[in-house]
Image: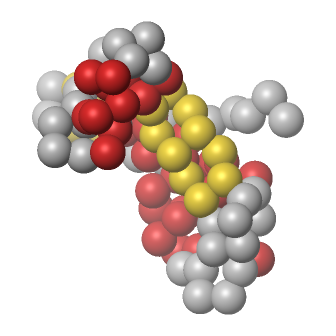
Amino acid sequence: MRGDGEVGGALVQADPGSPERRVGVQGLALADGRGIAFKIDDGDGSRRARIAVAVALLRALGADDLPGTDRAVLDELARPAVYGGGRVVGEVRVKLPF
């Protein structure tokens, strides 16, 4: 949560030890109410790992089986390219522990 102009901001000011103060925590939810939160602290400014992990977690929650899910888009986002020297040198792969 950002700390300015939002409900989370008021919570941060009211309780500096609040979990709302955590920067970079991602929350995902499906329409049926199931959800999950995660945090990656690897210094990756491009967010490539965050997107790949989000896709993997959504799939673990069953997003592929929901009506309207565009699996081709999820497939594309699931393995972002890693660039070095202006060319693709690898990809991010996610392995969940469950």
Residue plotted at (34% across, 38% down): 8
- Residue 85 position within the rendered picture, expressed as x and y whole percent measured from the top left: 16, 26
Name of the residue lying farthest toward the bottom: 67
| 58, 91: nearer the viewer | 58
* Quadrant showing the N terminus: top left
**Image color mode:** secondary structure
* Residue 15 lies in quadrant: top left
Q: Residue furthest front?
A: 14
The percent position of residue 79, horizontal first and vertical second, equals 49, 47
As displayed, is residue 74 above or below residue 36?
A: below
* Residue 74 visible within the image: yes
Q: Is residue 22 visible?
A: no
58 relative position to 15: left or right: right
Q: Is residue 54 above or below residue 44?
A: below
Nearest the viewer among 13 and 82 is 13
The residue nearer to you, when weighing 89 against 27, is 27
As drawn, the residue found furthest toward the right would be 98
Residue 13 screen position, x and y as percent: 27, 22
Numbered-mark total = 0
Judge from the rendering whether residue 84 lies leftward or rightward of residue 58; answer left or right: left
- Quadrant for the C terminus in the image: top right
Rendered residue at 73%/34% (across/down): 96
Looking at the picture, does residue 94 appear above or below residue 30? above
